[in-house]
Amino acid sequence: MTAAREEAKEEKRPLILVTNDDGITAPGILALMDAMQELGDVVVVAPDSPQSGMGHAITLNSPLRLDKVELPSHGTGYQCSGTPVDCVKLAVNQIMHRKPDLCVSGINHGSNSSINVIYSGTLSAAMEGAIEGIPSIGFSLNNYKLDADLDASKHIARLVARNILEHGLPINTLLNVNIPNKPMAELKGIRICRQALAKWEEEFSERLDPHNRPYYWLTGKFINPDKGDDTDEWALANGYVSIVPVEFDFTAHHAMTSLNKINWDDEG
Amino acid sequence: MTAAREEAKEEKRPLILVTNDDGITAPGILALMDAMQELGDVVVVAPDSPQSGMGHAITLNSPLRLDKVELPSHGTGYQCSGTPVDCVKLAVNQIMHRKPDLCVSGINHGSNSSINVIYSGTLSAAMEGAIEGIPSIGFSLNNYKLDADLDASKHIARLVARNILEHGLPINTLLNVNIPNKPMAELKGIRICRQALAKWEEEFSERLDPHNRPYYWLTGKFINPDKGDDTDEWALANGYVSIVPVEFDFTAHHAMTSLNKINWDDEG
């Protein structure tokens, strides 16, 4: 291959933004960088500390720090003092010289299926990418431990990302990919699912501090009354990788007819 | 009226949870309490500091404080050290003895129309109420100033809340109510709308600290290419109160067919 042709080929490599909510030192993001480096040129911009449960928070009332860091065996990355959504905004506006071809977030240590899509910083980062017009995907492994085996997740992340680079995504849509905690050979395949309509039932743990003032820890259990075999929860429980297409138009279009029947201007 | 009949009437008064994201001392939440006190028994649980832009963040890695406070001319309330979503979870689980009949959030100082629904703590609090199965509404006034005139907003909040107490809401749906910054006489009415598909274009302001290290302030401008007269942005620009029904099933159902056409198991 001539140098010129090699250069032309180089130019066609996709530009991929990698982020997460567990922080830039989490094993999950290093695994995702490995998976993406085979597909394109990777830029990593991630929080400098864990940001689980941050949802779509942005930092309005304090300034943000952004620092270059050397990652073990993974080259240079950028760490940010803000939320996962801040990371995507900073990456697109301050670091990358063109809109990336793909934004991937994760691999999250713990499931983001069902209602967790709402609380998850991982998915909010991907949603911010989608709002910016970038094909975006959040990846989560159904195992909370930092020393979880990430081999199958890496393989799935590469497979899904390659397909999206090739086929693109429907307009205003991102993907929420959840991966069962199993070796590759035991995964039954990939299913397109809808979000199971489940919720967390909170149980606050009330304690007293040394000054006898109460404080509360949020705990809870996951309650899923939605048993449909088209849900992400069903897919995961049955050994499939679940892919839920997610949108950022939150309008409940189905509710418009009944709301239009109310005579709002009637003072009652 | 006999004492027994009076008591029976008392028992039928709706129980209303009031919260916000501007903090328990903001004029907007006091105005919302005023409006709701005419409709039912009010319990207020709100953040002890401003939490704008917190989205659906929850506090997982630190404990929460919850303290009773006396509010000027508004009786007793509860302030919480966490996010707006934390406030709703704590209210329902630790403070109220039964599920409230209504959860209202606001009145936010500033618009939460269009894409702002995603970043807004006000709307996330209402969304959490809806997830808990409570009819829930977020109210926002299109004026960022803390000394804004809240009279029209108070009137609209009472009107909308009374209608929802009477008619209920479609399943898994909350309301995002935005109010133009105008006196009541100039409001043209109420419109049921869809979320305008707009976005923020970020412009980070980069500065140097006294030690010559850079830091960044998030700023931006609102870009709305969606000119539909069925959008909330159109309604607000034309003097109407906008009501967008919002859902917490984020599934992009319209995207499923095309995603199912991809051969995901093809290793390529």
Image: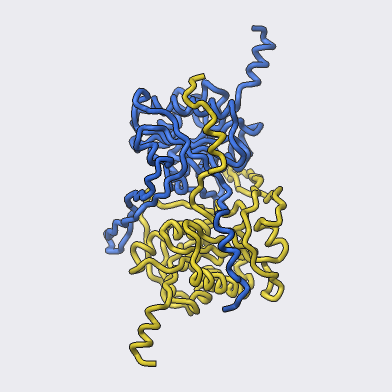
Chain colours: A blue, B yellow
The residue sitting at 58% across, 45% down in the picture is: B210
Q: Is A28 above or below relative to A261?
A: above
- Report how many numbered discs are placed on residues in the image: 0
Q: Is residue B40 visible?
A: yes
Q: Is residue A165 left or right of residue A23?
A: right
Q: Is residue A35 left or right of residue A204?
A: right
**Where B113 sits versus B179, above or below?**
above
Q: Is residue B78 above or below residue B217?
A: below
Which residue of the protein is positioned furthest toward the bottom in this rendering?
A: B1
Q: Position of residue B250 (x, y in %)?
A: 51, 47
Nearest the viewer among A94 and B104 is: B104
The residue depicted at 58 percent of the width and 31 percent of the height is A102
Q: Nearer the viewer, residue A262 or A47?
A: A262
Q: Does residue A34 show up?
A: no
Task: Describe residue B107's horizontal placement relative to residue A2 as left or right.
Answer: left
User: In this view of the protein, which residue sits in the foreground, B5 or A154?
Assistant: B5
Residue drawn at 29 percent across, 59 percent down: A206
Give how far across and how far down residue A148 sits, in percent: 34, 31
**Image spot of residue B40 (x, y percent):** 45, 76
Q: Is A184 located above or below residue A51 in the figure?
A: above
* Residue placed furthest toward the top: A1
Quarter the N terminus of chain A occupies: top right
Nearest the eye: A33 or A74: A33
Looking at the rendered image, the quarter that the C terminus of chain A falls into is bottom right
Image location (x, y in percent) of residue A168:
60, 31
In the figure, residue B15 lies in which quadrant? bottom left
